[in-house]
Amino acid sequence: MKKFFTPTLVVILTMLFVMVSSCGNNDNSNTNSSNTDKPSSLPRAKVYVANEAGGSVSVIDLQDSLKTTSIDLSDSAGTMFMAHNVQVAPNGKSVWVAAAGMDSSKTNYLIVIDPNSGTIKERVLLGKDLHVAHVVLDDQSKNAFVTAGATNEVIQVDATTYQVVRKFDLGAKHAPHGLRYAKGKLYVANMDGKSMSVITVADGKVTDIPLGGIAPQVAVTRDDKFIFISLYDTKEVIQYDLKNGQLNRIPLPATAQGPIQLYATPDSKLLYVADQGELLGRPVSNEVYVIDIPNAKVISTIKVGKKAHGVVVSNDGKSVFVTNTLDNTVSVIDVASQKVIHTIPVGKGPNGISYWFETGGMP
């Protein structure tokens, strides 16, 4: 999680950063501690994990015995960078990391990784004290978009020239955090604004939709029917109908402590919701909730590691990957059985997560 960016929430933010303030890199090069299936059952693909406290990105090779390697995000001067979110481009040719310097400069960058060589090929300077959080790309992988919570903006970067080309102003006291792209529009979760901003990229028009709760992230179904938004404080998931604009509230189980990231399966039938907790004085959670999308209700609860945060689904829809921030692990859930089949050690404070496959990346 990033800052909530208002005085009333500074205490909450401080609690979070104390938990992830360690700057060491502790990636493990081996596999998991609870492996019930052979790694060869997984497809040829890689999972990228943003280690916020470790200043690195872990790369999990799903066919090479779940081997995990590490990409150090430090620059030539030795400055470490806190990686909050990572996103594979839809064309699979680049991996983008939203990162902030761990030194006193607090300089924010988009760091671009070559997935073939595993090396950093570009650092896009965004500015200072922006509190960048999440990054996504458009369907053609031509532009990247990153939220800047402190300035209430979404920044657009040309993915070829690596130049900032535009900034979308969402208005004061919005604190945008997570976002997704679909059909020429950006859907942005606003934590302080307790709303979702819808940005039409072509003309820059911004429409604000009140949600009534702190919104960390959004998810888009591949059939383009729904947007889902997590509400941390109210322990709900909002289902937004793209056809008629109707909002449907889906309550989470009584054990919920506060959802963060969420992701739908490619067939648009299931939604996986990582329940984190910890903020607002709540206990840390270790649960992932499965929502039946057609019926808009929770149908299953899956136990993972401590402080479940990021989530992504494989392109074949068979596996779900969840970051466990306090355990420094990633849980792999088998969709067919709804059980954790692997637990993979990664770097310190894993947060965002993204999936690469041979012909592309999950959006």
Image (spheres, grey):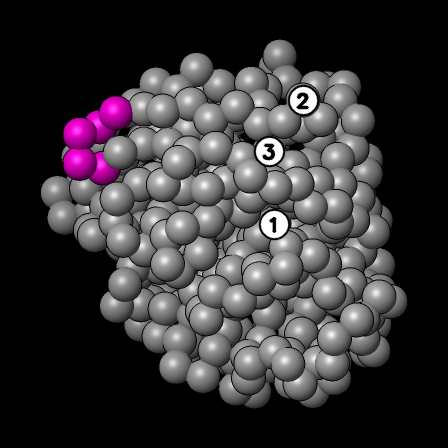
Label disc, if present, on residue 72 of the rendered structure: none
Q: What residue span does the magenta drawing correspond to?
A: 242-246
Location of residue 181 with respect to 199 vertically, above or below: below
Measuring 81% from the left and 35% from the top, which residue is drawn there?
18
Give the mark, 1 or 2, whose residue is nearer the N terminus: 2
Q: Which residue lies under the disc numbered 1? A: 310
Location of residue 357 with respect to 274 vertically, above or below: below
Q: Which residue lies under the disc numbered 2? A: 254
Type of amino acid under label 2: Ala
Measuring 73% from the left and 65% from the top, which residue is drawn there?
341
Q: Quadrant of residue 50?
A: bottom right
Label disc, if present, on residue 259 of the rendered structure: 3
Magenta stretch, main secondary structure, is loop
Residue 76 picture location, percent across and down: 67, 72
Q: Is residue 156 left or right of residue 104?
A: left
State the quadrant of the N terminus.
top right
Residue 136 picture location, percent across and down: 40, 55
Q: Secondary structure at mark 2?
A: loop
Local crowd at mark 2 within 10 Å, few (<14), some, or many (≥20)?
few
Q: Quadrant of residue 10?
A: top right
Q: Are marks 3 and 1 in contact (CB under 8 Å)?
A: no
Residue 348 shown in magenta:
no
Residue 322 picture location, percent across and down: 65, 54
Measuring 74% from the left and 75% from the top, which residue is drawn there?
37
Q: Are marks 1 and 2 in contact (CB under 8 Å)?
A: no
For the residue pair 128 and 173, the one nearer the viewer reads as: 173
Location of residue 180 with respect to 78 vertically, above or below: above
Q: Secondary structure at mark 1?
A: strand
The residue lying furthest to the left in this view is: 203
Residue 199 picture location, percent across and down: 24, 38
Type of amino acid under label 3: Pro
Location of residue 86 with respect to 41 vertically, above or below: above
